[in-house]
Image (cartoon, rainbow, N blue to C red):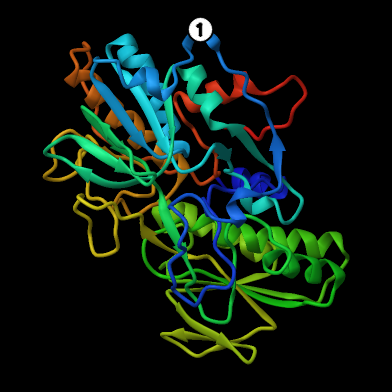
């Protein structure tokens, strides 16, 4: 494990980490006003361009789909969990189901390596989502879901259209919010005025003392350590030897979701890079060159970088926990709501990671396929988070691999 982690970070490979982008100019904790999964910064990340050519044999627009009386699986979302669910349903149920993707975005951004982007160590991959849906054999509706009527089995999209469903998969993601007042927030996409500026100052030698932290609550920890390790690599490459990097984490030990051994090995790796670690500390605010913590004494630093706080994307008509996340059972069913499933960051599962999102999508797809008469025994969800940051989507990984033009660069999945 130590060798794998060391190789992973030495290569500068990124992590799923933050799946979206924030909106500059909002107050601490203020909710972005754009639909979940869509924000002004998020619409224009630095990405590896990829054109998805439609498979015309499977093309089906929304108007034609509305006259299709097969059972309809409606998928609310356009990210990793949504596309994985569409692929799984097409494979498991074939023509038994009509599949419709309903997303506020017209593009699918594959970004398990967003952390490496501001360091110029990785690029994201973007596909045209309607074309991608067409290749799968799914219809596409450009709008987020505003509300659900489980009794009538229809949703109201944010463009006002009512769309029926027989089975609904909610994969609308999570909102990202400012968490630590005064700190630079890493949103997953490099921006000139935020984390990109921190990297430039590190590289130039004008910034030599940085603390990396994350808020308490549900989220995904590996990007925290990755940001620090990549910063160390930048300093080393620039020949800067007297800088100080510190990680402050509310986790009892780094990578605690992966077990004690992984945590100890991460601590060793951080120590090899001369990165200090303060575990079991919760960030409060950064001001006047000091990051205040609880418990414990504050820590001085020239700059503080924080991951965002996550909140579930609430949809009217669906029950959520206090933080807006959807509680699901072992087969992805939403508690107390018939024929509604959820997958990905919108669920109440504490770990938010793209690989887990694909696992949840597969579980929900199997349950739906069984419900429409397919000979399949749905498997329960058994989380298997990966410390190497790769998305091991059963369907998504090989599907995207087929779309990559010869010679195009795409990080392994």
Q: Nearer the viewer, residue 189 or 233?
A: 189
User: If the image is split into quadrants, where does the N terminus sit?
Assistant: top right
Q: How many marks?
A: 1
x and y, in percent, of residue 28 in the image: 48, 77
Q: Is residue 391 above or below residue 235?
A: above
Q: Nearer the viewer, residue 362 or 1?
A: 362
Secondary structure under the numbered disc 1 in the rendered image? helix
334 on left or right of 162: left
Whether 249 is drawn above or below 412: the answer is below
Identify the residue at horizontal 56%, vertical 37% (top origin): 107
Q: Dot 1 surroundings within 10 Å: few (below 14), some, or many (20 or more)?
A: few
According to the image, label 1 marks what residue? 57
Q: Residue at x 53, y 21 (%)?
A: 399
What percent of the width, then of the height, locates residue 182?
57, 82
Q: Is residue 259 visible?
A: no
Relative to 313, residue 142 above or below: above
């Amino acid at each position: 494990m130590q060798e794998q982690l060391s190789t992973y970070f030495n290569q500068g490979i990124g992590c799923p980490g933050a799946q979206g982008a924030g909106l500059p100019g909002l107050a601490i904790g203020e909710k972005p006003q754009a639909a979940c999964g869509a924000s002004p910064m998020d619409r224009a990340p630095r990405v590896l361009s990829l054109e998805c050519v439609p498979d015309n044999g499977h093309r089906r627009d929304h108007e034609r789909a509305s006259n299709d009386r097969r059972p309809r699986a409606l998928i609310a979302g356009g990210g990793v969990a949504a596309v994985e669910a569409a692929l799984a349903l097409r494979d498991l149920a074939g023509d038994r189901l009509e599949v419709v993707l309903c997303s506020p975005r017209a593009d699918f951004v594959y970004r398990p390596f967003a952390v490496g982007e501001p360091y110029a160590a990785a690029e994201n991959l973007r596909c045209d989502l309607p074309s991608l849906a067409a290749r799968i054999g799914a219809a596409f509706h450009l709008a987020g879901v505003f509300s659900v009527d489980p009794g009538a089995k229809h949703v109201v999209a944010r463009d006002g259209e009512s769309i029926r469903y027989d089975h609904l998969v909610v994969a609308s993601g999570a909102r990202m919010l400012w968490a630590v007042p005064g700190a630079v927030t890493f949103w997953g996409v490099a921006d000139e005025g935020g984390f990109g500026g921190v990297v430039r100052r590190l590289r130039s030698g004008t910034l030599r003392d940085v603390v990396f932290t994350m808020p308490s609550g549900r989220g995904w920890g590996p990007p925290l350590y990755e940001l620090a390790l990549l910063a160390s690599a930048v300093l080393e490459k620039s020949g800067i030897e007297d800088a100080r990097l510190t990680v402050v984490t509310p986790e009892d030990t780094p990578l605690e979701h992966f077990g004690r051994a992984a945590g100890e090995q991460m601590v060793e790796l951080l120590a090899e890079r001369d990165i200090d670690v303060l575990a079991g500390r919760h960030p409060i605010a950064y001001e006047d060159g000091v990051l205040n913590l609880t418990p414990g004494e504050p820590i001085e630093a020239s700059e503080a970088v924080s991951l965002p706080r996550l909140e579930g994307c609430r949809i009217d008509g669906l029950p959520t926990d206090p933080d807006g996340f959807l509680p699901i059972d072992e087969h992805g069913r939403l508690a107390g709501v018939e024929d509604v499933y959820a997958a990905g960051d919108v669920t109440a599962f504490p770990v938010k990671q793209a690989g887990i999102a694909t696992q949840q999508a597969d579980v929900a797809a199997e349950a739906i396929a069984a419900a429409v008469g397919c000979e399949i025994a749905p498997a329960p969800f058994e989380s298997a988070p990966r410390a190497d940051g790769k998305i091991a989507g059963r369907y998504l990984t090989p599907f995207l691999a087929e779309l990559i033009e010869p010679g195009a660069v795409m990080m392994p999945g």
